[in-house]
Image: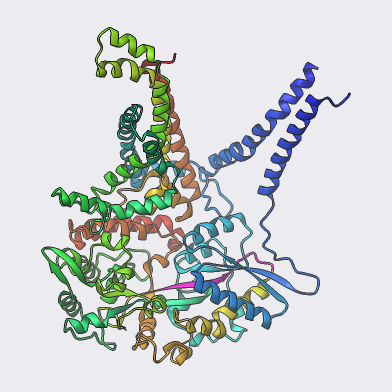
């Protein structure tokens, strides 16, 4: 009977494993092979050694777009601070709490395309909402999306805003899981609000912080559709992220081999960052 | 062994997960039927892919219907793909190796697709059919020729579905109101005349412009109309830092930065320029024939004039009709291309008001000129189509050089650098991209 049960178990896990092999492992291995060829996407690939990797290192735009991606990741710390602040505020017993929770979660469930088009209008230098508001307080706003200096900050603002909802919900859940008794004890010892927040709340929610950090970094490194719609990577490649450049190489310059090489370098970067994150997390993440 | 309740549940689960798995596999493995299998009685079904707004979809649905009536042995499946997704979707379908028999080929993607052997040469078929290529606009045809390295010569791979030259549209009512003479329909304005006209039509109050003299600057138009060039004749070198090109681009940038008669590109990009024209915020704008049906609904009078510069230069857009290189129904596919790109198809499209027939003889008839309907000087389109060229993004199979150029112009549009500096800085990078991306050109 035990054997039979084992057999069943294997049958059950066969489905996801086969799925993984077919739809992830085989394509992934193929892309390693492609990264060593001159594959255009249509014709038969021909091996060209490590040419793609060599070209990649010498490609100015690769480094520039990698830099842009790291710059755009500034939205992660800003977004985390904002969502933690909002979550703390929403964790209080205030009126209309459900309304605010829904309000902040709305961007998460709306279409990326629609939101991006909306933000395009917000950032319009002549007719946009943002410059209109700035004008009210006496500031002459920049041409957000068409200025090399301001296009990325604009994209960061939009990134922070669009990531707020999901992070807020995660933080709210984490905040509600912090045991009341900890606060009560601290209060009796005379700890003020800030001390309680710093010494109880932050350590208690640190697993959530780690989760948000890792998923946000991976998300930021792979971000591109909103850049494609809002700025087309411009002006002067100032908002071309690495995945957007990868996409252009694959589908616009028919250089699938080069794009695959780029994808693998990006994959390794993501892996290293995530491992480092886990490694250092031991120092600041506290599990119960 | 009896089938116990527990086991039954397990069995159900297993068969369910197996069914899901197998279903998934079949779903992915089975090819999307393109229906190109001949039917018993000699009838063939071909697939045709294109994009277009609802009115274009309607025109093509009707055209296909009448094509099928005339060719009872051929059935056409019309695959309508939204224009924004078209190239991306076609790239995937083409890479999958089972594409529609006939499909739209945007002139900017033509080079890439043909250099990858995805489109079939049609010279011989055209010669043996009733299409008179001598009566067609040269630039419409030549952009679909490819000789293995550069575009513009060699074998013909597609017939133009349409050709759309750029012209200057202007709001006659605004001109009259502000006492500015109409632009001539025969002689293009010089740059100085354009600036002067645009300045007279611009209204600013306390630094806020409520009415602009002119709309979007198609910088490629300015360059070509000023006798400038982007690439050398053998297409191996970027010559955009020559005097004419630099001068034209500097002028285009100055229209916004120095004279303030054209809204900044940012303002335009997001607030559709034709919307601004329609609401009377732009006195002039550059666009093509496709806007005519919409502008005919406007409450003010308007007309068309040539682009600025000498000798009617500028760029025209086009979409071609190509045949998939691996189609099993070459004959039927060509029949459809011949019908849509030939006199009958062209006539129907022109009557709708949004396109110019590919045939010179037809363009000079009422089919296109449509007397009594705006614009009054429809012949401007015809003179323009004869002189205007395909856009610079079409001339090489790999367009990275062009992306480098259009991205790299940013400091000039921002007014931070002169056109000369920007273009000189870009030259070595662009030259490298031409060489790297188009090896066939240097063989």
Q: Quadrant of residue B172?
A: bottom left
Which quarter of the figure is the C terminus of chain A placed in?
A: top left
Q: Is residue B22 one of those drawn in magenta?
A: no
Residue pushed farthest top?
A189
Q: Quadrant of residue B71?
A: bottom right
Front-most of B51 and B396? Answer: B51
Q: Is residue A19 left or right of residue A198?
A: right
| Up-down relation of residue A240 to residue B373 (above or below) | above
Q: State how the image is colored.
A: rainbow
Q: Is residue B207 something that shows in the picture? A: yes
Q: Is residue B324 one of those drawn in magenta?
A: yes
Give the residue at x 35% y 55%. Answer: B432
User: Magenta span covers which residues?
Assistant: B317-328
Which quarter of the figure is the N terminus of chain A placed in?
A: top right
Give the residue at x 64% y 73%. Answer: B333
Residue B428: give x, y in percent of width and height: 29, 56
Residue B105: give x, y in percent of width and height: 51, 68
């Amino acid at each position: 009977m035990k054997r039979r049960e084992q057999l069943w178990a294997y049958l059950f896990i066969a489905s996801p494993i086969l799925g993984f092999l077919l739809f992830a492992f085989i394509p992934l291995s193929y892309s390693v092979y492609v990264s060593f060829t001159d594959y255009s996407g249509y014709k038969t690939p021909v091996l060209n050694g490590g040419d793609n990797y060599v070209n990649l290192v010498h490609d100015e735009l690769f480094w520039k777009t990698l830099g842009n991606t790291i710059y755009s990741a500034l939205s992660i710390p800003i977004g985390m601070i904002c969502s933690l602040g909002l979550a703390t505020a929403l964790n209080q017993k205030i009126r209309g709490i459900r309304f605010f929770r829904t309000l902040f979660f709305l961007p998460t469930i709306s279409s990326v395309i629609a939101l991006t088009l909306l933000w395009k209008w917000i950032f319009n230098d002549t007719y946009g909402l943002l410059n209109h508001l700035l004008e009210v307080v006496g500031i002459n706003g920049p041409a957000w999306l068409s200025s090399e200096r301001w296009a990325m900050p604009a994209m960061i603002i939009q990134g922070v805003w669009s990531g707020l909802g999901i992070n807020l919900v995660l933080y709210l859940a984490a905040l509600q899981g912090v045991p009341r008794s900890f606060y009560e004890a601290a209060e009796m010892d005379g700890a003020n609000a800030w001390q309680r927040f710093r010494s109880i709340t932050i350590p208690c929610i640190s697993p959530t912080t780690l989760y948000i950090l890792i998923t946000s970094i991976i998300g930021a490194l792979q971000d591109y559709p909103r850049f494609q719609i809002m700025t087309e990577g411009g002006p002067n490649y100032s908002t071309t992220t690495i995945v957007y450049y990868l996409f252009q190489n694959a589908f616009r310059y028919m250089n699938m081999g080069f794009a695959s090489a780029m994808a693998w370098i990006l994959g390794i970067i993501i892996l290293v960052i995530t491992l480092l994150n886990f490694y250092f997390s031991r120092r600041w993440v506290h599990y119960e | 062994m009896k089938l116990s309740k527990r086991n039954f549940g397990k069995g159900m689960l297993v068969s369910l997960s197996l069914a899901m798995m197998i279903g998934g596999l079949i779903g992915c493995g089975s090819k999307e039927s393109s229906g190109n299998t001949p039917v018993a009685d000699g009838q063939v079904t071909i697939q045709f892919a294109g994009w277009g707004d609802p009115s274009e979809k309607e025109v093509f649905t009707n055209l296909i219907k009448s094509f099928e009536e005339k060719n009872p042995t051929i059935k056409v499946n019309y695959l309508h793909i939204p224009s924004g997704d078209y190239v991306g979707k076609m790239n995937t379908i083409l890479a999958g190796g089972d594409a529609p028999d006939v499909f739209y080929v945007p002139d900017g993607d033509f080079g890439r697709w043909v250099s990858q052997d995805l489109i079939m040469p049609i010279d011989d078929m055209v010669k043996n059919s009733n299409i008179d290529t001598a009566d067609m606009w040269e630039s419409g045809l030549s952009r679909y020729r490819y000789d293995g390295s550069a575009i513009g010569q060699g074998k013909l791979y597609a017939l133009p579905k349409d050709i759309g030259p750029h012209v200057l549209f202007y709001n006659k009512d605004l001109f009259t109101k502000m006492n500015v003479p109409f632009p001539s329909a025969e002689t293009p304005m010089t740059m100085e005349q354009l600036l002067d006209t645009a300045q007279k039509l611009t209204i600013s109050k306390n630094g806020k412009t409520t009415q602009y003299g002119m709309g979007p600057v198609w910088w490629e138009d300015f360059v070509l109309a000023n006798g400038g060039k982007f690439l050398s004749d053998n297409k191996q070198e970027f010559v955009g830092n020559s005097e004419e090109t630099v001068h034209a681009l500097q002028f285009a940038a100055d229209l916004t930065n120095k004279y303030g008669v054209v809204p900044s590109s940012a303002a335009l990009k997001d607030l559709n320029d034709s919307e601004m024209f329609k609401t009377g915020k732009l006195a002039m704008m550059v666009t093509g024939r496709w806007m005519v049906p919409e502008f005919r609904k406007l409450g003010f009078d308007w007309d068309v004039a040539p682009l600025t510069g000498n000798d009617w230069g500028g760029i025209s857009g086009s979409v071609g009709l190509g045949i998939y290189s691996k189609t099993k129904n070459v004959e039927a596919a060509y029949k459809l291309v011949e019908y849509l790109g030939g006199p009958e198809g062209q006539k129907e499209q022109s009557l709708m008001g949004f396109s110019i027939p590919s045939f010179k003889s037809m363009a000079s008839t009422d089919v296109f000129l449509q007397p009594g309907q705006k614009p009054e000087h429809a012949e401007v389109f015809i003179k323009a189509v004869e002189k205007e060229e395909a856009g610079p993004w079409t001339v090489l199979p790999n367009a990275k050089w062009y992306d480098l150029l259009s991205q790299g112009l940013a400091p000039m549009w921002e007014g931070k650098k002169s056109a000369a500096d920007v273009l000189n800085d870009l030259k070595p990078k662009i030259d490298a991209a031409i060489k790297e991306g188009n090896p066939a050109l240097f063989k």
